Each structure stands twice: as structure tokens, then as C-alpha cells.
Amino acid sequence: MAEPPLSTISGWGRQSALGRELVGEDLEKLSLRASLSRGLGRSYGDSSLPADDQRTVLNTRFADRILHFDQETGAIRAESGLALSELNRLLMPRGYFTPVSPGTSFVTLGGLVAADVHGKNQHRDGNFGDHVTALKMRVGDGSIIECSPEEHPDLFFATVGGMGLTGHILEVEFALRRIPSEWVWQENRRIHDIDEFQDALEEAASEWPYSMGWIDCLARGKNMGRGILMTGDWAEPEHAPPTPPKPGFRPSLRFDFPSWALNGLTIRAFNELYYRKQWRHESSGIVSYASFTYPLDAIRSWNRMYGRRGFTQYQCVLPREAGRSSARRVLEVLTARGGASFLCVIKDFGRESCGLLSFPRPGITLALDIAVRDDTQALVDALNEQVLREGGRIYLAKDSFTRREHFEAMEGKRLDEFKAVRDRWDPERRFQSAQSVRLLGD
Amino acid sequence: MRVAFLGATKGMGRALARLMAERGDSICLLGRNPEDLERSAADLGVYGNGPAVPCVPCDLENPESFTTAIESSSEALGGLDAVVVSAGVFAPQEELEADPELVERLLRVDFTNTVLFCEAAKKALLAEAAGTLCVFSSVAGERGRKPVIIYGAAKAGLTRYLEGLDHKHNGDGLRVVTVKPGFVKTSMTAGLQPPPFAGEPEGVARQVLRAIDRGTPVVYTPSIWRLIMAVIRALPRAVMRRVGF
């Protein structure tokens, strides 16, 4: 079989690398020749990019067959390239939804596991990995094995949140959750500053299964961290519209915005409008699950808004022990440097995940979308130093700028444990990504 | 609709079979790899939310398997309303030029054996008094072109065969649907630079299913390729000698 041609492979933030991309339905055959799996390329940074241009990555998007689905229990097993969007389209009308969903549905099952994604219900239901019952994998010695919390648990827990570095995920088995309808009862509330936000999220956690907040990152002083708290719960059939939501028109950004399009002024104008849109203190209503869970999926290729240089998302978690104003201190680092974030999201985490290197821990998480500029490295460095002082850590699925020494300091013992599993299952480091070389050294 | 499907495990065939299963058609899968068939059968079973999808061994490289395979699928479904063929071999011209055995295999599978399979399918469908034979050919067969000389020749032959079949048997209740995909983003075309107007398998599937339902004899998909190919067919030889496509 011919070698795939050298091509440019990009992450969602449009960071790219030269490499070879294998594409096909037969993961068992193709995975022997690849050093990393990637799916729909929605990780923001370099997690899904080859370590160097000699490396071949395996694109799993055409391996998307559902191998088993139990209508009674919701247990499902599928090939790892199955997209969440397709799963939703097919099984939501039958009353099932993924127990944990990230903010986009254009993600594969393999990606959900590798990044051990969290959603608006993290405080209640944990991460995706908490609901995975088994994985079929191609591991470092070339064999194919099944792992689960009981079988090869070390491999399983390192693979959940392991960013593809423990082997190729070929199949994923997990449990879907019953939903009463495809509609969500959503309540929005205006929040006046960052400290109120932390309290409000904590309060909402006991009452709502889904919650998150949007922050106007440019507001300073006493308004710093003002925004909108969004909470939701599945609507019971008797409250929901009688028909399922229609998939709306999804326009696509077909060209790159010029890099100056998103500047302090345009972002400020957008944020002001968005904040004022929530003119009442509180509002509520029934919305489709898509508009509640995947607002950004409404515009395909929205990453082109950031122009050719792309963007990065800085997402960190600040542990509960860091106290009430930890988020304020991190935002201050951003505003002090004049950093403008177009989209800033805040969410509380309720618990650690089962994954060895998974991101969440009890506390508060901030996610800041930042257009890449000459000073982005310095900004991320400063943010990381603050997060280190708070005892927090960053989310690998979003990262492309963190330095190795910062990452090691954040992860400490967890990283040693992860490396030990990697040594055991892949001593020759057959599995690598551009990110693993940057942050782990190999 | 009861459909015998050769090539439903991959690409456009997979997308079309899923669409059929989702609306409640009964499908019997034909193919050479039993394990792969079983996986697709499971998938289509979930899409169809109905009874198990039967599988029947059939290898496009082995014409002796054809009649039995079609008979078995007819038995499994209790008759046949349609036979779909989306299986085939593809290789870029450079690869073929370096490998005479591959050339022989491609011509045999994509032309000779596909025609033989259609002959067997035709008999079964004519015996049912009415039915649809839907076969994936290609726009590559529309004009001799540098990047697809061999593949295009096989598909040109197949297209002509299907055209003749339609002319002869249309009055007998056999509806022949010739699908001519343009560039579609599947694993088959992975590694090739997609031109503008490249299609997705799901879009192709929707269009083909409509054609099967209506008995449209020729489908260009995505539709824009009807126009593109009209232009390419009209180009003078002197131009075709110069251009790269």
C-alpha cells in the first residue's frame, strides 16, 4: 500500500504540522503503521499533530460503525471514529444522549476518551471517561487488546485523558443516558462580577444538572468577570414542544477573517451587546438541546474568524482550596497584559476524573479564547505562572503554548505515574504527538 | 424495499445502506470479508432499529459466487426489489503504471466481473417482474483523461453496458440506475487533493436513494458534476492533450 502524501495537518486553533495522514475504514489494519490517532481535529492545539514530518497519523473519521446498541439499557459499542453529532442524530429520537458532552458535537468517540472531555454537567456526572466501560486498543507491542476498569486497569486509566499516547483506540464501549425529550429548559441570569460568579455556580450546582457561565473578559475593576450564568435541565415531554427540534441551517465561514478583525474594539462591542442582551436579571425558556449544548456548532469553521494565525484556548482549573477569588486573580493577569479574549467561559468542577492525566478537579475552570499574536507565548507563560501559584493545571486538549517546565510543575506525581504506564506499554515510544514531544520530551 | 447490497461496508455504499436502513428498507449484505460484513450488519441493525441484517459471502474477484449469492440474498429477504453495486477497485494512474498485475485486477473487477455480477442480478430481478439495478460507475468514464486512463476505461465500459441494459429491459420492468460520482471525499480518494465541488458520502447517498426511488437512469453526484462533465466532454482533443485533468 502506498504511503500517504506529505500534507499539512491542523488543529482547531489552526496550528499545523507537516505529516502523513492515513485515512480509512479498517483501523485494525491501518493502526499498525501510525504513531497517533486523530479524529475530527477539534483539539485546539497540537494534541493531534504528528511529532515530526516522518510520522504518520491515522485519521479515524471513516471508522464509525456502531457495533452494538441496547435499547433497554443504553449500552453502546462503536468504532472510535463515530462522531457525536451522528450519534445524537440517530439516538436522541430514541431517548438516549451521551452522559457527558463537550461544547461541540463534531468530535469522535476516540477523541472524547483521549481528552476525557467534560461538559456542563461535570459537577454532577464527572467526565466522559467515568462512563466508559471498555476500550479496544492497538498497543505498543503491536497487539490488539481489550481494556477496562477491571482488565488492564493501568492502561485503561492512562488512556482516559491520555491524549492518544498509550496506543490507538479502536473501539469504545460506554453507557448512554435516558433523556425525557430533545428539549432543554434553560435559565439565564445576569452576574455582576467574578466573585459573584463563583458563588452562583456553586449554588447552581446543587439545583441544576447543567451549568456554565459566559464572561465579558474586557470588563475591569468592579465589573471584572461580569457575565451570564446559564443553567439547564432536560424538559419533560409535557413541557416540551410536540416535535423534535429541526436541524437549522448551518452556514460555514468560507474565508479567513483578516487578523485585525478581532481586536479590542470589536470584542468590546460584541461583549457589551451580548451582556446587554440579557437585559432582564433573569430569563428562562425551552430551547433545543443543540442551541443549549452546541451554540458554536451553528457556524461551521468558526475558527476562521481568527484569521490565518489562528487562536489558542487557554483553559485552566483552579482548585477549590485556592479560595473564592482565584478566578479574579487569573483574570487580572489577562487584563493587566491587555489581553483580549473573544470568548471566555467559566464552569465549576465537582470531582476528579478516573483518568490518570485527566484535566478536571474540584474547583473552578476558566477557558479563554485568545487570537495568536506575537505576545501570546508571554501571555500564556504569565497565566501559567499564576495558575501554578493557585495550585491549578491546564487542559491538554486546548493547549499549544505551555512550556514543559510549567507542565511538569503542575502535574508533579501524576505525570510520573503516567510516564510509568507509558514505559510499561510503549517503552519504544511508538506513540507520540507534537504535544507529547513539547510537554513530555518524547 | 428489499435490497441486495454489494459494497455497503465502505464509503458511499455505507452511507447509502445506512439511509436505506434508517427508513426501514431490508438489506442483505454481500461481500468477501465475513467479519467486516458482520460489523456493518450490526451497524445497519442499529440504524434500522429492526430485525438482524443478513450477510452472504460474495467476492467480486470470483464470478462463480455471484448467482448463489444473489439467490441466497433473495431467499434471506423473501424476494428482491433492488440490487446495489458500489464495490470496486480504485488506484491512481501512477500506481497502475508501476504494477501490471493491479491493472489486470482492476479491469477484471471493475469491468468484467461487475458486468457478470449485473448479469446475475438482472436475471433475478427480471424473474421478480420489477426491480432496480443500481450500479456505481464514475465520471471517470466520461472522457479519456490523463489521471484515470485505466480506471476510466473500465468505468466507461461499465457505463455503456448499463446503458444498453436499460435500453433493452426498461420495458420489462428492470430499472437501471447508473451512478456517476464526481470527486467524493471517501477513503478511496484520501490522499488526493480534493478539487472544488468535492462531495460528501452522505449527500451522494441522499441523491442516489432519490434516483432509485424514481428510477432515474443516470445520476451525476454531486449534481454540479453533470455540468462539469458536459464541459469536459466538449473540450477539443488539443485542449485535453494540454490540461492535467
Image (cartoon, rainbow, N blue to C red):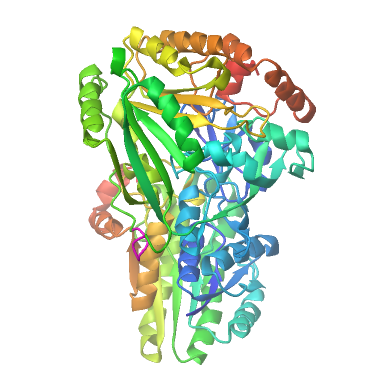
Residue at 47%, 9% (x, y): give it: A381
Q: Would you say A406 lies left or right of B242 here? A: right
Q: Residue at x 62, y 30 (%)?
A: A352
Q: Is residue B176 above or below residue A2?
A: below
Read off the magenta span.
A240-245
Front-most of residues A392 and B213: A392
Position of residue A404 relative to residue A108, above or below, is above
Q: What x and y, as percent, mark residue B95?
A: 54, 45
Residue at (64, 81) in percent of width and height: B72
Left or right of A91? Residue B210 is: left
Q: Quadrant of residue B205?
A: bottom left
- Disc count in the image? 0
In which quadrant of the rendered view does residue A292 lie?
A: top left
Could you tell whether A185 is left or right of A141 in the image? left
Q: Choose between A10 and B179: the one closer to the eye.
A: A10
Q: Is residue B11 above or below residue B65?
A: above
Q: Main secondary structure of the magenta part?
A: loop
Depth check: give the residue in front, A332 or B167: A332
Q: Does A84 appear above or below A46?
A: below
Query: Along the line of sight, which residue is nearer the eye, B65 or B116?
Result: B65
Quarter of the picture containing the N terminus of chain A is: top right
Q: Position of residue B64 (x, y in %)?
A: 66, 76
Please tell me whether residue A243 belongs to the stretch shown in magenta.
yes
Q: Which x, y percent locates residue B175?
A: 39, 81
